[in-house]
Every structure is written in structure tokens, then in C-alpha cells.
């Protein structure tokens, strides 16, 4: 089944995710519609609990939707079999917030990268060519492969592990990359380097980048389109200038006002403080 998604690479119609039943029922994502295009940089912005990470998990095929449909390249996504899911994952990959939980701690760096080469059909390439490809991927993220080989991920720093995740993406070259708070757990010095590497991947491969973030500044400076999420719904969307400089929704306005500004008093009157029982 195909749908008119205006040449979108990834689309959703009425996408919904519900957890639990009865009194414990929680609607994490509530009937959202979207069209993400090839080469577009999209930011999904919202507070913790807004539903943005749950939506990302559905985009990646790591959680099933309760209602609604997802379309990849205009066709209804079908990942019901292991083979179809692997084929889909060749086109969409992710970098997660916590690099320390993103790896199998018993798998060495070489195997992490070899798995990517094998996934792209290079299983039968000569060993020397595979080493050359792994070396090139590590060079892209400023990691000397000779210093990485035979190491386990837990022997690396957080910044090195996040760069290794980007080296994986360099080898896999997916059409879509979901970056879920990719810089929130690393220090400020490394953060700009990681973002620069992601942007370079985007420009060199015409890759669609989907940032999951609460960072309004990041969303404004890197995005083509911004979606603001509150309680599982998209409450506002548009270009960065439309959404950030001319916000229409009170929730968006509050998110922007909550960002501390240098040389201005920080207004805490809009902050939501839990009631004391």
C-alpha cells in the first residue's frame, strides 16, 4: 500500500502509542502526522515525558505503534519478519543519549565495526579491505584505529564511544539517522565536535537527520523543520524562524522563556513546581 506523502522519505499518519490499561493507561504519542524528507534536518523538541523518545523508538521499529501507520519512501512500512526488519535498519539508524549502554560490553571495537561492514553486504570482502574500511571510519571521527583495535567499549571514554557510534554510521550510510540527545552526556568541549561530525555525515550523504532534543538552541541553529511536542501531540511545527522567533503556542513560548540568557535575570515564575502533598 502506498500513500501520497509528497515525496517524503518517512511519514506518519495518526501515529499513536499507548502503554498500560485502565487507570494505568498512558498515551505517550497521540495521533501525530508528519512528513520527513530526504536530506532534511528535523528536530523534535519537548520536555522529558513529552513523547519524543517514544516516537523515535517507533520510527526505528524498536516499539510497535498502537494505532496509525508509518510509511517509508511512500510505502507502508512492513517489518513483521526478521529479514524485513534488517532491510529497514540498513536505511535507518540511531545514535542514543547514553553511549555507555549502547554497546554489547563483550563485543570488541573491531566486531562493532565489522558488523556494520557485514550488514552492508561486505561479509566476503578480503580482511585487508575490511581493515582499510574500519581505519577510514575511525579516521573520520578522529580515532586512531590502531589504538582502538582489540579494545572493549568500556575501555573508551564517553566521547570516544559516541564517536565510535558515528564511525558505525559512516560505514552503514543509512538514509535516515535518529539522534536522541546525542551530546547531552558528554562534556561541552566534545559536544561541538560530535555535532560537526553529524553535520558532515548529513551533507556528504544527503542524509535525513532527526534530532530528539530539549535543546531549543540546537534545534534553532541546525534544523530545517522543528516540531514541538507536548503530552504526545505536535502542538506547533514549522521553520526555526516561525517556531522559535514567532511562537504561537503558549507551551512553545514557555519553553523558550525557560532558556537562561546571559546578562538577563532568569525568570522562574513560569516554572512548573510539583505540589507538596
Image (cartoon, helix red, strand yellow):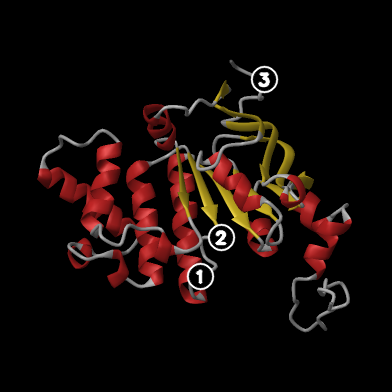
Furthest-front residue in view?
22
Residue annotated with mark 2 = 181
Left or right, residue 76 beside residue 26: left
- State the CA–CA distance, disc 3 to disc 2: 31 Å
Percent x, y of residue 192: 50, 67
Tell me the quadrant of the picture where the C terminus can be found. bottom right
Q: Earlier in the sequence, mark 3 or mark 2?
A: 3
The CA distance from mark 1 to mark 3 is 39 Å
What residue sits 52% from the left and 48% below the top? 178
Q: Position of residue 123 (x, y in %)?
A: 19, 36
* Label 3 packing within 10 angstroms: few (<14), some (14-19), many (20+): few
Q: Which mark is residue 194?
A: none
Task: From the viewer's perspective, tell me whether residue 100 is left or right of residue 40.
Answer: left
Residue at 40% over, 69% down: 159
Q: Of helix, strand and loop, which one carries label 2?
A: loop
Give residue 147's quadrant in the image.
bottom left
Please report the residue visible at 71 percent of the width from the left and 55 percent of the height from the top. 50
Q: Secondary structure at mark 1?
A: loop
Q: Determine which residue is flagged by label 1.
A: 185
Residue wearing tag 3: 4
Residue positioned 42% across, 32% down in the render: 85
- Circle 2/circle 1 CB separation < 8 Å: yes
Counting from the top left corner in percent of width and height, residue 25 is at: 73, 48
Q: Where residue 94 appears, x then y in whole percent?
A: 47, 49
From this view, report whether residue 186 is shown above or below residue 126: below
How far is the residue under mark 2 from the one under mark 1?
8 Å
The N terminus lies in which quarter of the figure? top right
- Which quadrant of the figure has residue 148? bottom left
Q: Which callout, 1 or 3, points at the residue further toward the start of the chain?
A: 3
Helix, strand or loop at label 3? It is loop
Q: For mark 2, does the 10 Å Cα neighbourhood hold few (<14), some (14 to 19), or many (20 or more) residues? A: some
Amino acid at each position: 500500500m502506498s500513500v501520497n506523502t509528497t515525496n517524503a522519505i518517512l511519514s506518519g499518519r495518526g501515529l499513536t502509542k499507548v502503554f498500560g490499561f485502565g487507570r494505568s493507561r498512558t498515551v505517550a504519542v497521540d495521533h501525530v502526522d508528519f512528513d520527513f524528507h530526504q536530506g532534511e534536518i528535523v528536530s523534535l523538541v519537548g520536555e522529558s515525558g513529552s513523547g519524543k523518545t517514544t516516537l523515535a523508538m517507533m520510527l526505528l521499529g524498536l516499539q510497535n505503534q498502537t494505532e496509525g501507520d508509518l510509511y517509508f519512501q511512500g510505502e507502508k512500512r512492513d517489518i513483521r519478519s526478521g529479514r524485513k526488519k534488517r532491510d529497514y535498519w540498513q536505511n535507518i539508524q540511531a545514535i542514543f543519549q547514553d553511549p555507555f549502554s549502547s554497546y554489547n560490553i563483550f563485543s570488541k571495537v573491531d566486531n562493532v565495526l565489522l558488523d556494520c561492514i557485514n550488514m552492508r553486504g561486505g561479509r566476503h570482502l578480503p580482511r585487508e579491505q575490511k581493515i582499510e574500511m574500519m581505519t577510514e571510519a575511525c579516521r573520520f571521527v578522529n580515532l586512531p584505529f590502531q589504538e582502538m583495535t582489540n579494545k572493549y567499549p568500556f575501555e573508551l571514554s564517553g566521547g570516544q564511544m559516541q564517536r565510535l557510534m558515528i564511525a558505525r554510521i559512516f560505514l552503514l550510510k543509512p538514509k535516515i539517522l535518529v539522534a536522541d540527545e546525542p551530546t547531552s552526556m558528554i562534556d561541552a568541549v566534545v559536544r561541538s565536535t560530535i555535532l560537526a561530525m553529524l553535520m558532515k555525515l548529513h551533507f556528504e550523504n544527503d542524509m535525513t537527520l532527526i534530532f530528539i532534543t530539549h535543546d531549543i538552541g540546537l534545534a534553532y541553529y541546525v534544523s530545517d523543520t522543528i516540531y514541538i511536542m507536548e503530552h504526545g501531540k505536535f502542538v506547533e511545527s514549522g521553520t526555526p524562524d516561525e517556531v522559535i522567533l514567532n511562537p504561537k503556542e503558549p507551551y512553545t513560548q514557555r519553553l523558550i522563556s525557560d532558556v537562561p540568557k546571559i546578562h538577563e535575570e532568569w525568570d522562574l515564575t513560569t516554572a512548573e513546581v510539583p505540589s507538596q502533598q
